[in-house]
Every structure is written in C-alpha cells, then in structure tokens.
Image (cartoon, helix red, strand yellow):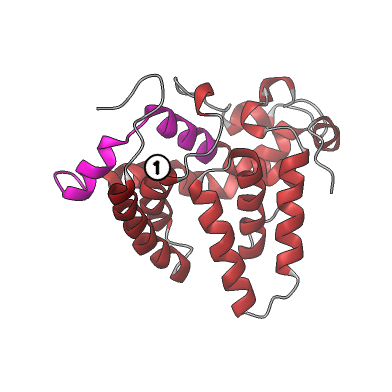
Amino acid sequence: MPIATGAAPRPNLFERGQLAMLALTNGLKLLAQPERTEYVFSTALYINILIPGRHLEAFCAPTAALPSPDELWALPRGSLGQTYAEYMGPLLEANASLHQVADDVRDRERNTAKEALRLRFHDIRQENRRRAITDQHDLWHVVTGYSTSEVDEVCLQAFNHAQVGNGLSLAITFGGLLRALLRAEWSAPARIWNAYQRGRQSQVLLFVDWQLLWSLPLSEVRLQLELAP
C-alpha cells in the first residue's frame, strides 16, 4: 500500500541487487531508444527506489496543476505565461498522454514478482514528485532555454539532478552523455556539466510559485530564478 507520510522502508542488500538489475534492464532499453517514453517510466520505477533524491518531504500531497494554455495566452506578449503557451501549442496532445503512459507501465506489472518488490518500497511522495516533475518538464525547457534536441534534453536532466538528485535524472544524464560521445559530440560533456552547475546555483524550480511569475517578462523571470546562462 502507498505510504502517505514518512519515509518508505529501505531495501536490504539482496533487494537492492534485484532493483538494480531491473533498473539496468530497463535503462539499457532507454539508452538504445531514448524516444520511448515507456522506458523512462519503467526505469524510474526501480532506480528512484535505489536513489530517491531530495525534497520528498514537500510532496506528501499532489501539487496544483499548471494553468491551461488558453489562460496563459491572455497574458502580455513576451511574458513567461504566453511564451510557455506558445511553446506548448504543438506539444499538448503528446503531453496529455504522459501520465497515462506511466499508469500503463505499472499496469503491465500487476500481479507479478516485480510489482510485489516495487510495492514493498512504494512511497506516495515519490509518485507526487514524479508527477510534478513531469507536469513542469516543458516549463523548465522554457525558463532554462534548453531545446528539445537530444543533448539539450540531457542538459535539462543534469540540471534536474543537481536540484533533485533522483536516480532517473542521474541515469539519463550518464546515458545521454555516453550516446553523445559515441556520436563524437565532443562539446557535450562541457555543456552537460554547465547545466549541472546551473542547477546547483539557481533556485529549485520545483518550489517556485509560478503564479507570481506568469505575467512577468521571461528575461526577468530568469533573473529572479538566478538562471545564469
């Protein structure tokens, strides 16, 4: 059963080995096909138990949903809200299904030994934080300036790992770095390291009260959040 408050039990050495093998199996699939969203969520199920990261105490309850694009379009041109609404336009249909993909991944494991192992360490705070990160992912693209290219997606994960420290962001960062090096993109390590440093130096985006920032110019929002280039 989900744990409403407090920390979930920690796995013993044998259980950690089992979880590591499941995370590795799914992580290798993700490394080979990073565009397959289901591999992201299947990897997260196990690696985030092993490396839970920070700020779980703030996610005993779900976070509020972001405003709809229609609400944000009414804001001034050049504002964070309108820039985000414009960015989201072609992505709405794809993003609407992300939580369904995560649910489908869990459904496929029902009544299996893998599900029994995972549920022993399930922490509802992990689920609430994952949903918040998923919901805000594209907003973070806008405020950080990272594009949706493969290396910039890895940069955003490095940024996220500096702020949250969970296992999935770490796995995607190292996997993406490896893929970039195999393609001889020699500038990638410096770009990814810079993104990690930005994450350490800026405000933690998970805790930002976006309601106070939607109407501000994007450049001013970046200054307030200490998002140095």
In this picture, residue 175 sits left or right of residue 159: left
Percent of width and height locating residue 64: 52, 22
Which of the 4 image quarters holds residue 29?
bottom left
Q: Is residue 150 left or right of residue 212?
A: left
The percent coordinates of residue 45 (x first, y second) are 36, 46
Q: Which residue, given by chain and number where applicable, does mark 1 sit on?
A: 49
Considering the numbered disc 1 on the image, is that residue within a helix, a strand or a loop? Answer: helix
Residue at position x 47%, y 46% in the image:
93
Taking the image as shown, residue 8 lies to the left or right of residue 201, namely: left
* Crowdedness near tag 1: few (<14), some (14–19) or many (≥20) residues, C-alpha within 10 Å: many
Magenta: main secondary structure: helix
User: Is 150 colored magenta in this rendering?
Assistant: no
Q: Residue furthest front?
A: 13
Residue flagged by tag 1: what amino acid is it? Ile
Per the rendered image, the range of residues in magenta is 109-135
Question: Which residue is rendered at x = 36% and y = 60% of the image?
Answer: 26
Residue 132: x, y in percent?
A: 52, 33
**Whole-percent x and y of residue 49?**
40, 42
- Which residue is located at x 83 percent, y 32 percent? 217
Image quarter (top left, top right, bottom left or bottom right) of the N terminus: top left
Q: Is residue 121 magenta?
A: yes
Residue 179 visible? The answer is: yes
